[in-house]
Image (spheres, grey):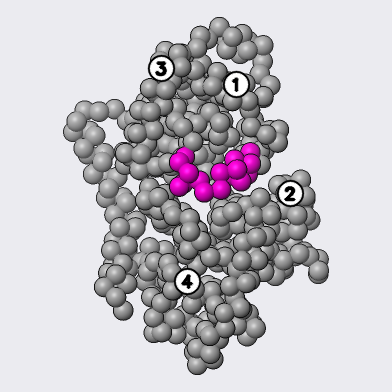
Amino acid sequence: MSLRTLLTPIISSRMLSRDRLLAHRIKAESARAKAGKPHVVRVYLQVDDPYSVLLAQVLPEFLRRYPVAVQLSLVSPPPDGAAPERDKLVAYSRVDSQLLARRHGLQFLDHGTQPDAVCLQHAARQLLTAIERGQGVTMAAPVLLAAWGMPLDPATLRELAETPLATEQALSSHQQAADAERTRLGHYLGATLHYEGEWYWGIDRLHHLEARLEQLGLRLPEDPQPGMSPRVVPWGPLIPPHFDVQNPPKLPAGSPPIEFFLSFRSPYSAIVAPRVFAMAERFGVQVQLRFVLPMVMRGLPVPKEKRQYIVRDTAREAWLQGTDFGRLNDPVGKPTERGLSLIPWAEQQGHGREYVLAFMDLVWAKGVDAGSDRGLARIVRTAGLNWDEAKAALRNDEWRARAEANRSLLFELGLWGVPSFRWGNVTAWGQDRLWVLEQAMLSSGGGSLGAQ
């Protein structure tokens, strides 16, 4: 065992603990109050990003609920290192945003292509004018919806037509400053919010910020109906988190399996794995494991800001789901290769599920070093398998061809990252997108829910 593998679990368990996060929030609020500063939420919108279109639509209601100030900025797309398959990311963002819009009663339609660059530049200059006039929050949604070809009422269109454009130079200076600030604070994406040291991506993570503000006593009572007293019961979140359906009807025999694209080095794969197998059991379908090598082991380096945000966001999501996570031992390199090499053998023994769950839990929540024989043996035995037989299986290198075939299929589906899923002709990416498959299963395969 190296010094790194010895210390990493100790350090990560402290850095990613819920207690440390809450202590950081208390410290940040104390410093803010001592300095006499208001509650300021920084919002970073990217005009060519569909997720920014969705976030812009909920900002007015967010401000109506919480007495905070919003500092709105326009940012550039993420750098290449943070978006290694940019074309796939751009295309999938449109598909995914359309699904999110339908789910949450927002506006967005995927027209199959990005808006014209001239149109987007016009929107950015127009929105910058609104920001400079103090109207950014109210004008962001109309400006972005118009740029993306969404219908607007005549009065709103007239208001847009009367809004002058900021200069190209002003926009360039604004975006450069906003990009630099976003990087300094530790992020790389648009459609993000930052409040006192913590990041929240898009409408998917807005509920975490809402819960934080509510704990500070900042949530306002709901507006009363005529003749009624104001409610004191807090509203539900603007965009509530998804919790899996617990007692769905079983699907007919012969229904497709859930194809689970995963990586042993993906923290999001780690926390979603138990839910994938539980969902399959509830619906009465199988899970087909489609493992791939992690990006960094395919020659795609991951920037520091992205690595740090992902692992912290995973810890936050794991806490919400009640999943153990945080005492990790990064399995990059040899540990991942050794781990993946045993999946085909474990499946042959009828223990593929148990092996994947054991690896994810012991490596990402218990700090076990899968690169050592001692660590991997513990994983194997926890899965109910024989270590002596596993050692023989480690010499079989055929798993590499299967991993590459899975990667190729992932790309054919228009996806590139893990965890990703396919059920029949329905695909989804992300640990927070199991509801896409769930809806399809509940409607007996509704292909309109994100078919690729």
Q: Please report contact status of discs 4 and 2: CB closer than 8 Å, yes or no.
A: no
Image: magenta residue range: 78-94
| Residue type at the position of mark 3 | Ala
Residue beneath disc 3: 170
Q: Earlier in the sequence, mark 4 or mark 2?
A: 4
Rendered location of residue 197, percent (x, y): 31, 42
Closer to the camera: disc 1 or disc 2?
A: 1
Q: Residue at x 67, y 64 (%)?
A: 259
Q: Where does label 1 land, which residue?
A: 119
Q: CA distance from mark 4 to mark 1?
A: 45 Å
> Which secondary structure, mark 4?
helix
Q: CA distance from mark 3 to mark 4?
A: 48 Å
Residue 53 lies, with reference to residue 401, above or below; the image says above
Q: Secondary structure at mark 1?
A: helix
Q: Earlier in the sequence, mark 3 or mark 4?
A: 3
What residue would you read off at disc 4? 336
Is 17 located above or below residue 156 in the figure? below
Label 2: which residue?
451
The structure residue drawn at horizontal position 52% and vertical position 39%, both measured from the top left corner, is: 203
Please name the amino acid that badge 4 sits on: Thr
- Residue at 37% x, 51% y is 304
